[in-house]
Image: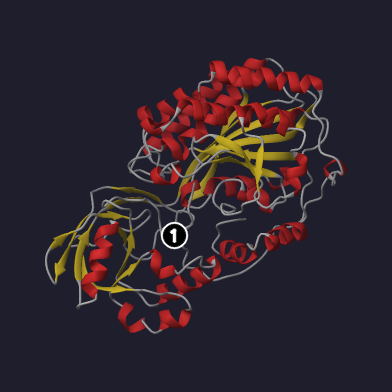
Amino acid sequence: MRLLSISLLTLGLSLPTALALPAALAQSATPPSVSPDTRTAVRNLIGEVLVNGQAYDYDRQLADTIGPRLTGSPNYVHAVAWALQQFHALGLTNIHTESFTMPALWEPETPASGQITAPRIQNLHIYSAGWSPSTPAQGITGDVTYLSQILPLEKLDASKDKIAGHIVLIDNSSYGEHPAIGDLIQALARLNTFAPQAVLLSGSANGTQNADSLSFNGELAAFPVAQVGLEDVLLIKRLLDHGPVTVHFAFTNRIRPTTQVDNVVAEIPGRDLPKEIVIVGGHLDSWHPGTGAQDNGTGSATVLDVARSVQALGRTPRRTLRFILFGGEEQGLVGSNAYAKQHLADMPAIDAVLISDTGAQPAKGWYLMGREDEKQALTNIEPLLAGLGSNQTSTNTEFLFETDHAGFDLFGVPTLVLWTGVDKYFKLHHQASDTFDAVVQADLTQGVATTAATAYAIADSTQPFAPHFSPAQVEDMLKKANELDSYKALKAAGFVP
């Protein structure tokens, strides 16, 4: 899952163009029914996952055998080849890759090093932020300016003379409580015009890294960006209370220019309605401090094991199940947004999109992601999930733009994101502790069973899952979720279609 970083861009708004929708996708007054045959198939499918599930081993292979999967890296390319092999072994059809463009590929080449040089010497726990350019060979040395407030803009403007040519420190306190993403992007766009020498961000406790970037869509940042352990940040702030603080740091990153990167796609054709599609997806890429076992090895493993279990069932659903492993999610949903735009003409045929990307704590049910009408659509499916303890829905839109459903949502397609607990997940997420030993097999298997049962029930129904929204309805959804301003900013940043 991509926790939003900040793009240094200006604002704009243009909701996706309306698509002509077939009459079958019009608003339904009653939720899709679940036939006795579908109910029996779902029961057998859940049993197959619980007894013979392979997601735990899929995740082990991704995390331990392949390792961290920075988008476009050799490990990522290995993971793509591995995923294709798994789909072929399962006997799926239409197995292929579809490419998208990354403006740059990035990997650390040398560990970062740095220290406070005045008013005293202190080594720093420091790391290059993702998609940061390298520092000059001799490194960067400069005085630190801590931006205690970057909102409202007047506060930032008042610090202009202290920013130009200086190393700027920003931490969570700089943003204030619950800042609007639009206001935040405006502030950082203004910061960019002030030409700082470099930017320091706050990492995690115990001097650890929480990998992320300060740019969207796989574009390099405009200046070196480093992340410093939380305790070092607090020390710098205390020292600044008593006078100037100078730091020196250096790192070298391996940068490759514009490159094509692959999503992985495979299908189980529907028996009656093969041109109507239910997508089950997750992202294959990860950050590099750990091995991406939770984020998003568990989601990728879920996609593969849903495919395996439906194949083992021997009863294909009415609609086609399409399985997609996206790349570039951590850099701004690049692969899934590209897929949605490349398949714009197919949007009316996509009945639903189900995404797994919140780790492997026990599933509670499904995030509706602003589509409150989907609560009714799930009415007849929820009893199938009761025995798994995952028959709930959440109207929380905190993660509305955080994972690969977003591009489809904005084209009006019904989407669901697996709802799991995230307290454990966010202690591991993007950090060195995101490794396979933290994955609980029973919890992962329960999430796979929830995903398989829901996807199959939707795909096997005689009725569409939920209506497709027009651009006006999408805008209304965003307004109700208090996310329209965020959409404006993210649209301008190229984060969403």
In this figure, which residue is indicated by the disc labeled 1? Answer: 215
Point 23% across, 49% down: residue: 111
Name the quadrant containing residue 68: top left
- Asked whether, in this view, residue 123 is left or right of residue 57, the answer is left
Give the tally of numbered discs: 1
- Asked whether, in this view, residue 342 is left or right of residue 283, the answer is right
Rendered-image quadrant of the C terminus: bottom right
Above or below 461: residue 396:
below
Measured as percent of width and height from the top left, residue 115 is found at: 17, 61
Above or below 405: residue 267:
above
Measured as percent of width and height from the top left, residue 161 is found at: 33, 84
Q: Relative to the observer, which residue lies in front, 105 or 414?
A: 414
Q: Relative to the observer, which residue lies in front, 116 or 238?
A: 238
**Could you tell me which secondary element the residue under label 1 belongs to?**
loop
- Asked whether, in this view, residue 358 is left or right of residue 266, the answer is left
Q: Which residue type does callout 1 highlight? A: Ser
Point 51% across, 65% down: residue: 178
Measured as percent of width and height from the top left, residue 435 is found at: 36, 35
Point 48% across, 33% down: residue: 298
Question: In this view of the protein, can residue 91 be seen by the observer?
Answer: no
Measured as percent of width and height from the top left, residue 460 is found at: 76, 27
- Asked whether, in this view, residue 296 is left or right of residue 475, the answer is left
Point 51% across, 23% down: residue: 86
Q: Relative to the observer, which residue lies in front, 62 or 429?
A: 429
